[in-house]
């Protein structure tokens, strides 16, 4: 947040940095962290990125696919 003060800059940097490998690493760590669910972690990341904080796994996946332009 210090590097990108505007929301639009932060969102662009977030999507640039968060490639498939990092996503997989994040989900594996979240799955192993039993203090909260993976869905809760993803919902918080979506909210932080300016998207709706969806909690249902299939809706999260649909939104992420839509954001990435997956057909």
Image: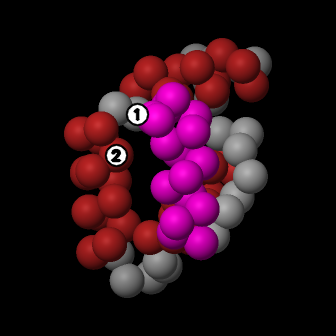
Direction from residue 1 to residue 37 in the image, left or right? left
In-front residue for pair 70/43 = 70
Direction from residue 42 to residue 44 in the image, left or right? right
Per the image, label 1 sits on a secondary structure element best described as loop
Q: Which residue is mark 1?
A: 18
Q: Earlier in the sequence, mark 1 or mark 2?
A: 1
Vertical side of 60 occupied by 17: above or below: above
Is 37 a magenta residue? no
User: Is the N terminus in the top left, top right, bottom left or bottom right quadrant?
Assistant: top right
Residue 53 in the image: x percent, y percent?
70, 58
**Pointers 1 and 2 in contact (C-beta within 8 Å):** yes
User: Residue at left 63%, top 27%?
Assistant: 11
Mark 1 and mark 2: Cα distance apart in space = 6 Å
Question: What's the magenta region?
Answer: 56-71
Residue 39 in the image: x percent, y percent?
51, 70
Q: Main secondary structure of the magenta part?
A: helix
Q: Which residue is mark 2?
A: 23
Residue 51 in the image: x percent, y percent?
71, 44
Vertical side of 68 occupied by 34: above or below: below
Vertical side of 48 occupied by 14: above or below: above
């Amino acid at each position: 947040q210090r590097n990108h003060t505007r929301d639009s800059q932060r969102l662009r940097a977030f999507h640039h940095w968060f490639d498939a490998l990092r996503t997989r690493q994040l989900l594996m760590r979240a799955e192993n962290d039993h203090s909260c669910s993976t869905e809760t972690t993803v919902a918080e990341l979506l909210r932080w990125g300016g998207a709706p904080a969806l909690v249902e796994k299939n809706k999260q996946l649909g939104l992420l696919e839509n954001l990435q332009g997956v057909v």
